[in-house]
Amino acid sequence: MLAIFVLGFFIDFIEISFIIVPILVPVMDAFGIDPIWFAVLIAMNLQASFLTPPFGLSLFFLKGAAGNSITTMDIYKGIIPFILLQLLGLGLVIMFPDLVFAFI
């Protein structure tokens, strides 16, 4: 998960999916990890990494919508609580895997 998060700093989710998922799927099968739970973890992790600088694709969309009234640094500072909340949610799903299956 840490590798996926760090890669999200620099590259897009399609490239991460093509690089990391084929490597991790055999490991997932070997350890008997549920594929749905694992896919949710990867998706949550990618979502959090989209909000992190320097790549932060979502941050560039926000900057484009805000125009010149808000600086990029203000957006970077404002996004910190959201990244922390997403990482907290990721940690909760890791600790309590039944959260993924609660509504299935």
Image: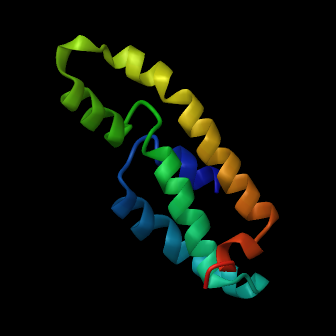
- Compared across the picture, whether 42 is left or right of 67 comes to right
Instruction: Residue at the far front: name it.
Output: 103
Quadrant containing the N terminus is bottom right
What residue appears at the point 71 percent right and 63 percent down from the top-left corner? 93
Q: Vertically, is 51 above or below 40?
A: above
Point 48% across, 23% down: residue: 78
- The x, y position of residue 19, in whole percent, is 45, 66
Pick the residue in front: 91 or 98: 98
Q: Position of residue 88 (x, y in %)?
A: 70, 46
In the displayed structure, does residue 61 sit left or right of residue 5?
A: left
Spot the residue most to the right: 95
**Screen quadrant of the C terminus:** bottom right
Please state which of residues 89 and 103 is positioned toward the viewer in this rendering.
Answer: 103
Answer above or below: position of 65 versus 23: above
Is residue 29 shown left or right of residue 74?
Answer: right
The residue depicted at 55 percent of the width and 44 percent of the height is: 6
Residue at the spot x=71%, y=70% of the render?
99
Q: Position of residue 29 (x, y in %)?
A: 68, 87
* Residue 82 occupies quadrant: top right
